[in-house]
Amino acid sequence: QVQLVESGGGLVQAGGSLRLSCAASGLTFSAYAMGWFRQAPGKEREFVAFISWSGATTSYADSVKGRFTIARDNAKNTVYLYLQMTSLKPEDTAVYYCAADSTSLAVRAGTNDYWGQGTQVTVSS
């Protein structure tokens, strides 16, 4: 059974930090590109960050560059994806989703095959 399960969301004050995690299992996710997306109320889901299967390549949306860091741990059967978020702003408030696909292009485009259920991040001013 394929599962992507996010955790780590919550309520934080502006300027604070959170670390999101995503546990991916059921496929050889160590060979999959992965990423984070977010969706704020009344808005479309948007790309946040991307990481290649090896972790060698990362990319970020301009809105989070320099504040967020994506990382992954392929060491075990369950692959863990992380998003370290610092200097959080109220506009970062959204449901954050973990994404995975066998192709990098699909993750970058948000057309990937696999999604988590999301975790809520709320940043208060």
Image (tube, rainbow, N blue to C red):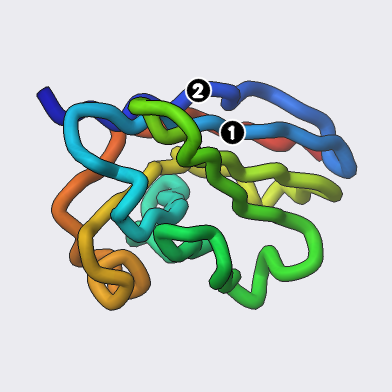
Q: Residue at x 19, y 66 (%)?
A: 111
**Mark 2 and 1 residues: CB-CB less than 8 Å, in contact?**
yes
**Amino acid marked by disc 2:** Ser
- Alpha carbon distance from label 2 to label 1: 6 Å
Q: Secondary structure at mark 1?
A: strand
Instruction: Write the residue at 64% across / 50% down.
Output: 92
Q: Is residue 48 visible?
A: no
- Quarter of the image for residue 9 reads top right
Write down the residue under mark 1. Answer: 20
Q: Quick one: 84 or 37, which is closer to the camera?
A: 84
Quarter occupied by the C terminus: top right
Q: Which mark is residue 7?
A: 2
Q: Answer above or below: position of 125 versus 36.
A: above
Label ID, residue 43: none
Q: Residue at x 49, y 34 (%)?
A: 75
Residue closest to the eye, 101 or 16 = 101
Is 113 above or below relative to 98? below
